[in-house]
Amino acid sequence: MTLVGTMRDHERDLLTGAYLLILTGESSDVYGAPMMTPDAAIGARARMPNPALQSFAVLVGRWRTEGSHGLLPDVTLHGHASFEWIENGAFLLMRSELDHPSVPHGIAIFGSDDVQHTFFMLYFDERGVSRIQNVSMENNELKWWRDQPGFSQRCACVISSDGNTIVSRGELSRDGVTWEKDLELTYSRDM
């Protein structure tokens, strides 16, 4: 079979780019590799603020954290967290880390369901743990929770009226009835 035709300039550019990616080993097609150049043209009209997430704007920024965990008595935890809009506000990204090896670094993406009028959080951490959490944001109180037999979690985060402090209280339950202390943090906005 013989292919007849001429290579257009943009086809040649695409082919050249593909060869460069192969030679350098940098490709967004490789699992776990960073995306080198986002293709902004695909889905560009959807890269806009999600009006349902407007109440989450108070979270955006960098935070210092200090607190404790129920499984680490007499240990004060220190760390950092950040919240930033992704895709021009279509979603909210949270990153968190604490200075203790028993507490994993994590990332989460907040989004909404406009039909059910609900929020959710997709969580992933360095242990490979991934979870879906239900989320609510009302009256400057952010809550997330998951009801899973054998391991339920809930967290309430009260945001100060000036938006510069968040006090969170996490709890976990192994039987769905008895709740015990989980991660408790105070977030202080980096100025």
Image (spheres, grey):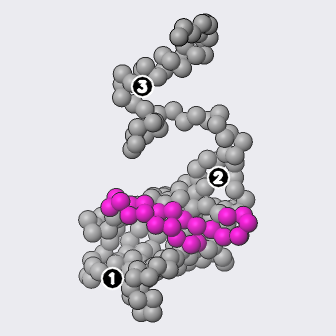
Which is more N-terminal, label 2 or label 1? Answer: 1
Instruction: Please report the residue visible at 54 percent of the width from the left and 65 percent of the height from the top.
Output: 121
Say whether residue 165 is magenta: no
Between residues 146 and 94, which one lies in front from this camera angle? 146
Q: Where, by quadrant of the figure, is residue 125 drawn?
A: bottom left
Q: Left or right of 102: which side holds 168?
A: right
Residue 80 screen position, x and y as percent: 40, 61
Q: Label 1 vs label 2: CA separation?
A: 34 Å
Which residue bears the numbered disc 3? 21
Q: Residue furthest front?
A: 1
Q: Residues within 10 Å of mark 1 (few under 14, many from 20)?
A: some
Badge 2 marks a residue whose secondary structure is helix
Q: Label 2 vs label 3: CA separation?
A: 30 Å
Work out whether 148 lies above or below 113.
below
Q: Left or right of 182: which side holds 53?
A: right
Say whether residue 131 is magenta: yes
Which residue bears the numbered disc 1? 70
Badge 3 marks a residue whose secondary structure is helix
Q: Where, by quadrant of the figure, is residue 47 drawn?
A: top right
Q: Which mark is residue 89?
A: 2
Work out whether 190 lies above or below 24.
below
Q: Which residues are magenta?
A: 113-135
Q: Which mark is residue 191?
A: none
